[in-house]
Image (tube, rainbow, N blue to C red):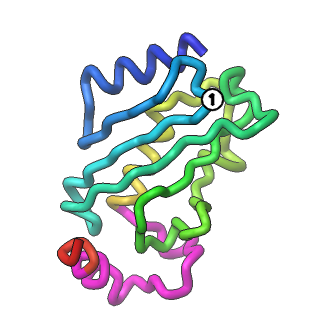
Amino acid sequence: MKSLLKQIQSINQEPENGVVIENSDDNLADGLIIHMHVAEGIHRGASYDFKLVFVEGGDYLDGRSPPAVVPISAIFHPNMEEDNRICCNLLDEDWEPGTTLEAIIATIYCLLENPEFDNSLVDTCNSSDYEDEVQTRIASK
């Protein structure tokens, strides 16, 4: 757990890509809130919040299980469902012990900049109209 707390502190001291991490206590029982502001790509100008939930019985702190990443903000994205599912190999079949919080955040941020339409979870997101729809939604917030 000390390693994870050090990672949080490091990320918050030198934030990249508009990322800030919030945690309510040092035992991480409530998970982490990650605030992201997207500067590039299709979601440029948007800000989103995600919650990292340390799955009950999971061993993220030992590196054996990935945390669940839950979108808090409403998001229109082909790889993110509103029922709290993100299609991301790093958080599933490609998970390895020692995966850092920074790697998890970078992967989510990369998906925001570059959605993977070939792995779409959401049928209403298609590549031809997607960017216009996203920018319309961002502008209306």
The residue that appears at 47% across and 56% down in the rendered structure is 72
Image coords of residue 60 (percent x, y)? 68, 29
Q: Position of residue 3 (x, y in %)?
A: 54, 14
Query: In the picture shown, does residue 110 fall above or below 120?
Result: above
Drawn side of residue 61 relative to residue 73, left or right: right
Q: Residue at x 27, y 20 (%)?
A: 13
Question: The N terminus lies in which quarter of the figure?
Answer: top right
| Mark 1 surroundings within 10 Å by alpha-carbon count, few (fewer than 14), some (14 through 19), many (20 or more) | few
Which residue is the extreme one toward the top? 2
In the displayed structure, 47 sits above or below 122; it is: above
Q: Secondary structure at mark 1?
A: loop
Quadrant housing residue 9: top left
Q: Nearer the viewer, residue 42 or 12?
A: 12
**In the rendering, at what x and y percent does residue 140 appear?**
21, 77
What's the residue at 56%, 69% (across, down)?
A: 81
Judge whether 137 appears above or below 16 on screen: below
Residue at horizontal 55%, vertical 74%? 120
129 inside magenta stretch: yes
Figure quadrant of the C terminus: bottom left
In the picture provided, is 59 more to the left or to the right than 31? right
Name which residue type carries label 1.
Ala
Asked whether residue 6 is drawn in magenta, I would say no
Q: Which residues are magenta?
A: 114-136
Residue to which mark 1 is pinned: 29
The answer to which image quadrant residue 122 occupies is: bottom right
Number of on-image labels: 1
Residue 103 spot, x, y in % from top left: 47, 36
